[in-house]
Image: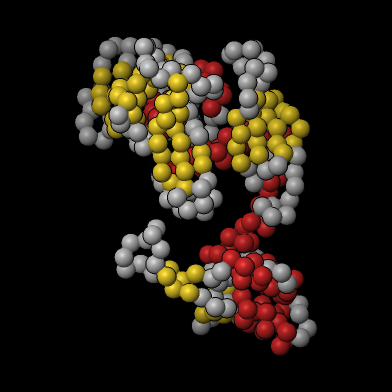
């Protein structure tokens, strides 16, 4: 299989990437024997397999035919070592995608209640799934949509699916904040956008010239975008997570719609327009925590307050309470 060596704008000088054309890689998967070789290597992903053992697993009678297809996979999807053969990272991803149903499954889940009422219209928040997308909605607004791999549905009963949708989205958003695209692992950049009077965005307090705000994250490589609320980077910050944990809430596993049922509505104040910076305050049981978020989505500092009136900066630099 032909490869080309090049340096692209997304890499620094001195970094070389060998690229195989997408057409050539996907052509490899057009043969049943090659897919079966990947499947059988995927049975023991952490171990190498000898030629004879792999041939026996695949069950191809003609050794020459088997060897021909195995050589075709070497380099991009299969690695040959002194002890035998193993999947490359790309090969593991192909097997993972097969198990996840990314290319093979078409699933639908009829609406199921989240067990939480919308505070505005007082109707049940429900979750449904179609076209690889989980949707959380009520009667008064547009749905919040998450990608969710169809292969993940089999691991949960219907009642557990809404929480599973949230946990998957939480992990994907953590990768986004870390600067990685959940789809292609490209560089993800964030920007705080002041919306004016836009629906379903975070409302800003006071006499702000922009009534609402949200974040836009976009991948430099594939163009994948995410559009979370302006409060989202603060909500997943470790210090805010600790504040919520002190009140019996685990932001990693407790769905956001249940958390918001317990929290007071967050107060969001615009600190500056150029560059845009906001302050987010969460309150619960007379305790509070305030986070300052920069224009690219990073949390500059977090200050915690309590009913007793103590304050402390908990951004890793100083704290007195």
Residue at the spot x=63%, y=78% of the render?
72
Q: Which quadrant, please, contains the N terminus? A: bottom right
- Work out whether residue 225 or residue 31 is closer to the camera in this orientation and state it: 225
Residue at the spot x=72%, y=28% of the render?
112
- Give the residue furthest to the bottom: 64
Q: Is residue 136 left or right of residue 267?
A: right
Q: Is residue 19 left or right of residue 30?
A: left
- Residue 22 visible? The answer is yes
- Residue 44 visible? The answer is no
Q: Is residue 232 above or below residue 39?
A: above
Q: Position of residue 291 (x, y in %)?
A: 34, 26
Q: Position of residue 4 (x, y in %)?
A: 48, 74
Q: Position of residue 217 (x, y in %)?
A: 46, 40
Residue at the spot x=74%, y=36% of the render?
109
Residue at the spot x=49%, y=69% of the render?
19
- Work out whether residue 130 or residue 238 is closer to the camera in this orientation and state it: 130
Q: Is residue 167 left or right of residue 196?
A: right
| Quadrant of res 23 | bottom right
| Quadrant of res 47 | bottom right
Q: Position of residue 222 (x, y in %)?
A: 51, 52
């Amino acid at each position: 299989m032909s490869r080309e060596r090049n340096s692209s704008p997304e890499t620094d000088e001195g970094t070389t990437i060998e690229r195989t054309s997408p057409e050539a890689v996907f052509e490899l998967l057009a043969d049943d024997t090659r897919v079966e070789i990947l499947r059988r290597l995927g049975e023991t992903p952490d171990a190498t397999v000898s030629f004879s053992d792999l041939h026996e697993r695949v069950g191809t009678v003609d050794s020459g035919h088997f060897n021909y297809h195995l050589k075709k996979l070497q380099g991009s999807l299969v690695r040959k070592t002194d002890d035998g053969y193993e999947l490359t990272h790309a090969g593991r991803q192909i097997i993972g995608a097969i198990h996840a149903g990314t290319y093979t499954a078409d699933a639908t889940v009829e609406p199921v209640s989240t067990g939480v009422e919308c505070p505005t219209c007082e109707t049940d928040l429900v979750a449904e799934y179609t076209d690889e997308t989980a949707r959380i909605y009520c009667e008064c607004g547009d749905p919040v949509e998450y990608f969710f791999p169809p292969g993940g549905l089999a691991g949960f009963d219907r009642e557990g699916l809404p929480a599973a949708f949230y946990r998957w989205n939480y992990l994907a958003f953590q990768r986004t904040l870390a600067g990685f695209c959940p789809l292609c692992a490209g560089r993800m950049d964030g920007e705080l956008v002041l919306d004016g009077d836009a629906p379903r965005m975070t409302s800003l307090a006071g006499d702000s010239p922009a009534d609402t705000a949200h974040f836009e994250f976009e991948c430099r490589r594939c163009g994948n975008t995410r559009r979370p609320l302006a409060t989202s980077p603060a909500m997943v910050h470790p210090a805010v997570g600790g504040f919520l944990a002190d009140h019996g809430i685990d932001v990693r596993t407790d769905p956001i719609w249940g958390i918001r049922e317990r929290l007071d509505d967050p107060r969001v104040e615009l600190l500056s327009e150029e560059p845009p910076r906001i302050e987010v305050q969460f309150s619960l049981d007379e305790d509070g925590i305030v986070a300052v978020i920069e224009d690219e989505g990073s949390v500059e500092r977090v200050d915690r307050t309590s009913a007793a009136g103590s304050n402390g900066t908990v951004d890793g630099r100083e704290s007195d309470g």
